[in-house]
Image (tube, coloured by chain):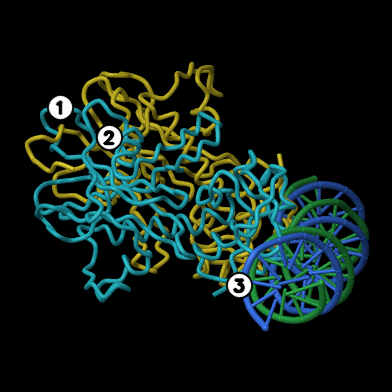
Chain colours: A cyan, B yellow, C blue, D green
Amino acid sequence: MSYDPSAYPPFAVTVDLVVLTVRRHALCGLAVRRGEPPFQGRWALPGGFVRADEDLSQAAARELAEETGLRAHDPAVPVQDNGAHLEQLATYGDPKRDPRMRVVSVAHLALAPDLPAPRAGGDASNARWAPVEELLQQAGFARDGDPVAPLAFDHTQILSDGVERARSKIEYSSLATAFCPTEFTVGELRRVYEAVWGVALDPRNFHRKVTGTPGFLVPTGGTTTRQGGRPAQLFRAGGATLLNPPMLRPEV
Amino acid sequence: MSYDPSAYPPFAVTVDLVVLTVRRHALCGLAVRRGEPPFQGRWALPGGFVRADEDLSQAAARELAEETGLRAHDPAVPVQDNGAHLEQLATYGDPKRDPRMRVVSVAHLALAPDLPAPRAGGDASNARWAPVEELLQQAGFARDGDPVAPLAFDHTQILSDGVERARSKIEYSSLATAFCPTEFTVGELRRVYEAVWGVALDPRNFHRKVTGTPGFLVPTGGTTTRQGGRPAQLFRAGGATLLNPPMLRPEV
DNA sequence: GTGTTTATCGTCAGGCAGACGACTATGATC
DNA sequence: GATCATAGTCGTCTGCCTGACGATAAACAC
């Protein structure tokens, strides 16, 4: 209850980012290699300190831009500008989570369409997209044979929470479109759901569901055959943000 | 990217609590009167500084105990001990949210059964339960005629977010039982939903829904007539935490 | 006993999802 | 150019769940 300004313990406040995208039918997360101790050389989530005059969401948007070049999609601006979806995830403040000092990290979740290539201060070798299962496993080997150590700090937990948030949120919101380019087909959107959930969905029922939900998809009039097969209608995300009734995730 | 410990700006970190309960058919929130500037004399959410060796959830549980005497229900302990449900809500860090210094507040949401009486350091006149609509309105008069000013700081926003979280979360989880005593009837649970959502629900359909959801309710064998009318079966919360399919909130 | 209140069981129609058949329109292959 | 493989799109059918609502049961107040 005391508000004596000299009595509060000093904290450092950071933002960490769970940046997710769908590449090659897999849900992937962005990881950066740490260049300094602690956990030097280990992979971690991108992030950094909140500046003195910055709001938390501003800090997250700035870090996102620095790491990926993505502009965060400002919810106040209804323009579909292919920017990433960015939202606060949770805050992590275990006293021992950083061995150097007391750091409270406000984690954010960003969802982005497939991107050209990651850049971490211009150094591509220090940033990569990796399937989330690979980043979440405690030890083992990546697909290319490189040994994989767990993420630094408590970032495995943060990533896990972010993935779970994304998986549950595409059930009842139109957030899955954040993984798609501005114009996309029903099949591409379905493959997003399949990658995020790790399941196979019936194309016919999925088509009926998404085209039958008012405000979810808006046809642009164009078609594409970029997936092969019969040309598919192109859609843009509609204004609806909540799906009611929700998309049902299959059991197991 | 820089981790120079001397370079980070200093922050104060607090926890603020949105404590909700259901009293007299209304969703109520706990407010405390501020005894010092800024916002002296205004109502605010309970909260306080995080201590140097404390985790965020520990700090929230400590503040909850100090303000209400409630023990937080530790998710690791499966015992139904009538403790409050406590979860992290969101973090608020606008640089101007506290005029004195840079304060980042990690808000938590607590749901509690109806309590005897609030206590704020033993001083009951400085703590009260009030219907959330009353606390959320920007100005006006309470039911007893006292003028009501908006909550201090950004607490109106925090309370609003907490109420919205509670309203949506009882749809798809068994959280509504956190508002009930250890043993309760279907009708009492229904009145919780009605108070939180501010709607009327059909008693017959509600009864069918909750008793037909496996793991939601466990009959204790006892009955009660404390609500008048025909004796009702008593239940305890079952192990299920997720409701699938969810309880549907009526339109409008 | 009569009325009131709350609890509980049942019935019925409409909506939606899962399973799956059928047809369409492309490009690739022979 | 016929055939095939691939995706997309439209329908049908069945079962489950919900909303609307009738009916019965068991207490209390008078």
Q: Nearer the viewer, mark 3 or mark 2?
A: 2
- Taking the image as shown, residue A241 lies to the left or right of residue B82, namely right
Q: Marks 1 and 3, Cα distance to the nearest angstrom?
A: 52 Å
**Disc 1 marks which amino acid?**
Pro
Q: Nearer the viewer, mark 2 or mark 1?
A: 2
Q: Residue at x 13, y 53 (%)?
A: A35
Q: Quadrant of the N terminus of chain A?
A: top left
- CB atoms of marks 3 and 2 within 8 Å: no
Q: Does residue A32 sit above or below B242 in this rendering?
A: above
Q: Quadrant of residue B228?
A: bottom right
Q: Quadrant of the C terminus of chain A?
A: bottom right
Give me the disc on residue B5.
none
Determine the secondary structure under disc 1.
loop
The one of A93 and B223 positioned closer to us in this rendering: A93
Give me the disc on residue A5.
1
**Disc 2 marks which amino acid?**
Val
- CB atoms of marks 2 and 1 within 8 Å: no
Q: Marks 2 and 1, Cα distance to the nearest angstrom?
A: 14 Å
Dot 1 and dot 3 within a common chain = no
Q: How many numbered circles are shown?
A: 3
Q: Chain of mark 3?
A: B
- The residue at which mark 2 appears reads as B104
Q: Chain of mark 1?
A: A
Q: Chain of mark 2?
A: B
- The residue at which mark 3 appears reads as B214
Determine the secondary structure under disc 3.
loop
Q: Does residue A155 sit above or below C28 in this rendering?
A: above
Q: Residue furthest left?
A: B6
Residue A71 rendering spot, x and y as whole percentages: 40, 37
Q: Does residue A184 sit above or below B29 in this rendering?
A: below
State whether residue A21 appears in this view.
yes
**Disc 3 marks which amino acid?**
Pro
